[in-house]
Amino acid sequence: MVGILATHEAMALAEEKGLDLVEVATNSKPPVCRIMDYGKFKYEQSKRAKKAKQKQHVTHLKEVKLRPKIEKHDYQFKLRNAIRFLEGRDKVKVTVIFRGRELAHIDLGRKILDGFVADLTDVANVEVPPKMEGRNMSLVLSPKPVKVEKQPKAADGEKKADPAGREVTADERE
């Protein structure tokens, strides 16, 4: 904190230290400036942005296609794929495709979709209910939110296992 300085004095001070004079708040009276290594600042800022981008997850919409006359093994295979997609935090669109005379038995497709939802109740929520779109009946499932369990702190004298697996009291940990 240097205080209020004239522009040419601040520039001279920054040059003397081998750093840059960077304007931080332009709208304030007088404008606020900072003496820093601007190249290093931009580099650290880009590193932080890159790290934040790595942690975020982009949700994709994966599709599982079924037929009204699907066999049990094929159904189980498609169900396992849907579970894998949901565990990967992606949304799943389940589609029953009707061809020819199958269109007369829309109730069979509805049964398959209802069974699919029933089998996935523990890992998914129905985001878009089943609806007909031309010759296809589809619904969208989204993964259930992940619950993060917090471990309670051990009270004084209470035993708790350390990472090595042996029991340690709260007094010994400190």
Image: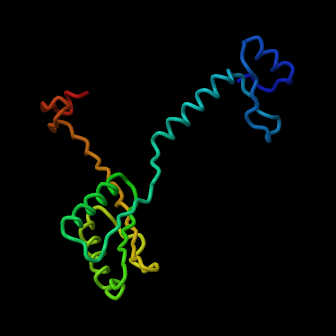
* 72 relative position to 25: left or right: left
Q: In which quarter of the image is the C terminus?
A: top left
Q: Where is residue 151 in the image (x, y as percent from the top left)?
A: 26, 45
> Which residue sits furthest top?
16
Quadrant of the image occupied by residue 62: bottom left
Residue 121, position in %: x, y?
Answer: 27, 67
Left or right of 100 on screen, residue 7: right
The one of 46 and 116 positioned closer to us in this rendering: 116
Residue 48 drawn at (x, y percent): 54, 33
In the rendered image, the vertical position of residue 62 relative to residue 161, given as above or below: below
Residue at the limit of the structure toward the front, as seen here = 100
Q: Where is residue 172 in the image (x, y as percent from the top left)?
A: 19, 27
Q: What is the residue that sits farthest to the bottom in this orientation?
A: 104
Q: Which residue is drawn at 46% across and 80% down?
A: 134
What residue is at 76 percent from the left and 23 percent from the top?
21
Number of labels in the image equals 0
On-image quarter of the N terminus: top right
At 12% from the left and 30% from the top, the residue drawn is: 166
Q: Which of 7 and 37 is in front in this view?
A: 37
Left or right, 154 with reference to 24: left
What is the basis of the colouring in this image? rainbow
Q: Is 142 drawn above or below residue 102 in the view shown? A: above
In the figure, residue 64 lies in which quadrant? bottom left
Left or right position of 127 against 24? left
Instruction: Identify the residue at horizontal 78%, vertical 14% (top origin).
Output: 15
The part of the image, by quadrant, that contains residue 5 is top right
